[in-house]
Structures are given as structure tokens and as C-alpha cells.
Image: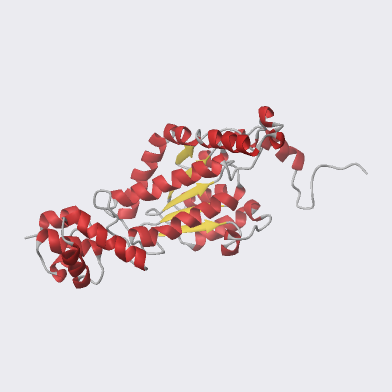
Amino acid sequence: MATTGTDHHGLDHRGLRDELAGLATEARRDDLADIDRMATADILRTMNAEDAKVPAAVADAVPAIAAAVDAAAERMRRGGRLVYAGAGTAGRLGVLDASECPPTFGTDPAQVVGLIAGGPRAVGTAVEGAEDDAAAAAADVSGLDVGPDDTVVGVSASGRTPYAVQAVRTARAAGALTVGVSCNPGSPLGAAAEHPVEVVVGPELIAGSTRLKAGTAQKLVLNMLSTVIMIRLGKTYGNLMVDLRATNEKLRARSLGIVEAATGASPEDAEAALTSTGGGVKEAILVLAADVDAATAARLLRDSDGRLREAIAAAP
């Protein structure tokens, strides 16, 4: 019997194959066709040379990233959230970035959220077919009740992943700011988002394995988005992580070093200030820099919306 090229879901595999064939991230490098015959060190050098191309591609996208950062920060100042949505590697990178914001910047866990196709179990286990479930994306975004103060970032190497594209479309229909991070130009994800960020890294070392250069590019872009948004929100003092949460011994030691670096205080005075503020780094810096007590430091920070420079300037 002749085959039609479709399965029981009605998917046209030949059409999809042709669509993928036109994507830079899916292209095959003919010059690497014999990579499996190369010496191990030569494969590694080739891979390293490919990886070295990623930062330049990200640099080309800086104007688009900057526009997205400024727009997202404006909304987050009003109490909005930053939401990542993706599948597979892209989804895991979003979950990773979101999970690192609370200890690094003292954010509430609900302030930066990572949605991944297939749900939480997809972080550690492949959930087959989840990336094609546009209805699940719409439900996941709607379940967060996103609105005009929120920013939803769809992440997809190909820029065509149904889950990421639908997440952005649903968010945009709800009035949220939308960003599309992909590694192909003119992608459906970029077209769906107000702020397309397309980092074109070209074909992968292993054809179609977008956890490689494309994954690295997406990680760099997400680092930029969350970090610079937090800088704009006053979550740092210079380049110091003054809003970190000291949840382990390493972070407690880091907190002490930050207070010392920011104020020039001795270790003893820095530790005493941290003790008086219950471990609050910003408050401890303010105690030392403005010569106020912990209660006054806390009030000054509340009045300054958590911005340490403004709180110091407003101190009596």
C-alpha cells in the first residue's frame, strides 16, 4: 500500500521535513561529513571553533535584546512577571534561568517563571510530543493569568516550535509584552512576538542538534535578559549582588564579602551589620554607609523601592 506521508495525528511529515530543510539550524555541514573519522582532539577543536562563533551572533542581536530588556523592566517595576516558555532544551534553559533568580537577586519565585512543554517532569525526562501541543501552551499561559504588566518570552531554536509560538500568541492576546528568542531569521516565533530576538548561529556540528550552538546562544540571551532587567530594577549595587539570599554557607560568606566591598568596612563590622539586619545585604550596606540603625535602613529601602543608591542618597 502506498504511504501518504501522514500519521494518525494528521501530521504531514514530508511537508515538515521540507520546512525543516530550509532552516539554518537544521542544515548539514558537508565539510563535517567525516567527523566520526577525525581524531578526538581534532573533533574537540572543531567544536570549540564552532562555539566561538556564538558570542558574535549574540552581539548582532544586542539592539533587539536591549529593547526587550527596557520594555520588560518597565512592566516589572509595576509588579509584572517575567515568564519563559519553551520545549526541550529551550524550555529547560528557561526553567534554569527562572530558578536561579531568587537566590541571585532575591526575587519571589513567582516573579520569574519557567514554563516547559510537558510540565515539570520534562525538565529531567523527554516528554514525547509535548513540543507540538499548542493547546497546552495556551492553557499554561492562561493559567498564570498574564496581563499587561507581564512579559512572556518564547524560546525555540527553530523558531517554529508550536508550544513556544502559541505561548507567545496567547500572552500577546492577553496584553502581555512578548519576546521571541530563536536562532533562525524570519521565524514564526519572531513574527508572533513584539520583540523578536533572532540569533543566527548557523548549522550545528551534528546536524539538527540544537542543544549545541543554538542552546549556547539561547543561554547567553536569557542571561542577558534576566540579569540586565534585574540591574534596571535596582537588584544590584554596581556589579554587586546586593539582593542575594544567603541560603547556604557559601552565600553567607559571599554576603560578607559584598558588604565589605561596598563599604570598605572591616570583616568584623560587616558581620555585625549583617547580624543586625538578619542577613539583609542591602540593609547592612546602608547601616554602614549611612550610619543608621537596621530599622532606619529598612525604612529607607522601602521608601526607595529597594534601590540602594537612592536609599543612601536619602539617608539623614
**View extreme (right): residue:** 1
Residue 211 relative to residue 272: left or right: right
**View extreme (left): residue:** 316
**Vertical comparison of 267 with 7: above or below:** below
Give the residue displayed 51% in from the left and 63% down from the top: 143
Q: Position of residue 293 (x, y in %)?
A: 12, 69
Q: Position of residue 296 (x, y in %)?
A: 13, 68
Residue 259: image quadrant is: bottom left
**Closest to the observer, 214 or 3:** 214
Q: Position of residue 12 (x, y in %)?
A: 75, 43
**View extreme (top): residue:** 31
Q: Quadrant of the C terminus?
A: bottom left
Residue 131 relative to residue 77: left or right: right
Give the residue displayed 47% in from the left and 62% down from the top: 144
Residue 195: image quadrant is: top left
Q: Position of residue 262 (x, y in %)?
A: 20, 54
Q: Quadrant of the N terminus?
A: top right
